[in-house]
Amino acid sequence: MPDVFQVLKQDHDEVKAMLAQLEEGPRASAGATAEQLAFRKSAVDKVIIEESKHEAAEQMYFWPAVKQLGPDGQRIAEVGLEQEAEADPVLADLDKLQPDDEGFEARLAVFAAAARAHITYEEANAWPLLRASISADEAEALGDKITRAKKLAPTRPHPHVPAQPGAAKSAGSAVNGRARPTSHGPSGPGDGTDQVQKSPDSARRCAVISCGWQVKTRTSRPSIRLL
Ligand SMILES: [Fe+2]
Ligand SMILES: [Fe+2]
């Protein structure tokens, strides 16, 4: 089973590859055809979807785990969450723009630079700290949680409900069993078995209409603890 670092690394590499492809692709200003621009739009859509799911899963499990690692972990998590929050409105702008709209390429360039810097920050700062603090089994368990969370995570950023670095300060942890999403509205007490689910009436859900992001909290104790 892939561990948390392998799961996140695969996402990072995919996003970087998609951004590199977009930077090489034909642009409206260079005389791209309608078909090429339609492909460019769909490629940006894919980046938005993958990035939104990745960050939502990180906010649910990865950053709470990092925050548990003392003052350094808290500081690193706050910076990382702030970077993610800053990217939300850029992605939201891109989502609304067409490749031949004024501002599309400029916003894409801003996002590409920010995304690369954010990925580098996570890998160079958060990963070494977390890697030194959890066992191989714990890293696999965290990777599994992130993989499962991504499957039902929102596919768009929420410009009006941005990621809130401050919210993570009070959020529990995947490590101690109280992980919850920090960018999807209020959430109640958890016990480490929070699971993203689609439909139970008892599930807490994001307040944003059509988001579909829901978290069901079980009352039983977790069978596996990360730390
Ligand atoms: Fe991130
Ligand atoms: Fe990441």
Image (cartoon, grey):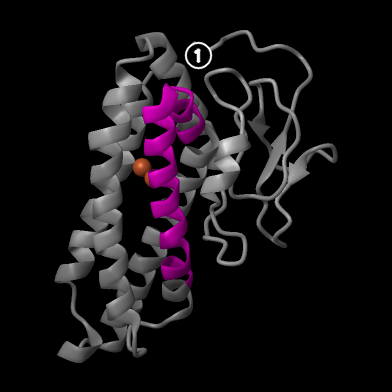
Q: State which quarter of the image contains the N terminus.
A: top left
Position of 11 compared to 189: left or right? left
Examine the structure image and report whether residue 185 is included in the region drawn in magenta.
no
Q: Residue at the right extreme?
A: 201
Q: Is residue 131 something one can see in this rendering?
A: yes
- In the displayed structure, 124 sits above or below 95; it is above
Q: Residue at (60%, 40%) from the top-left corner? A: 181
Q: Residue at x 30, y 72 (%)?
A: 108
Image position, residue 11 (x, y; %): 33, 42
Q: Start and end of the magenta stretch?
A: 63-92
Residue 215: quarter of image: top right
Q: Is residue 153 above or below residue 97?
A: above
Q: x, y (%) of residue 14?
A: 28, 48
Total number of numbered discs in the rendering: 1
Question: In this rendering, is residue 157 above or below 60?
Answer: below
Q: Which residue is mark 1?
A: 226
Q: Quadrant of residue 210?
A: bottom right
| Secondary-structure class at tag 1 | loop
68 w.r.t. 76: above or below = above
On whether residue 86 falls in the magenta region, the answer is: yes
Q: Residues within 10 Å of mark 1 (few under 14, many from 20)?
A: some
Q: Is residue 57 left or right of residue 111?
A: right
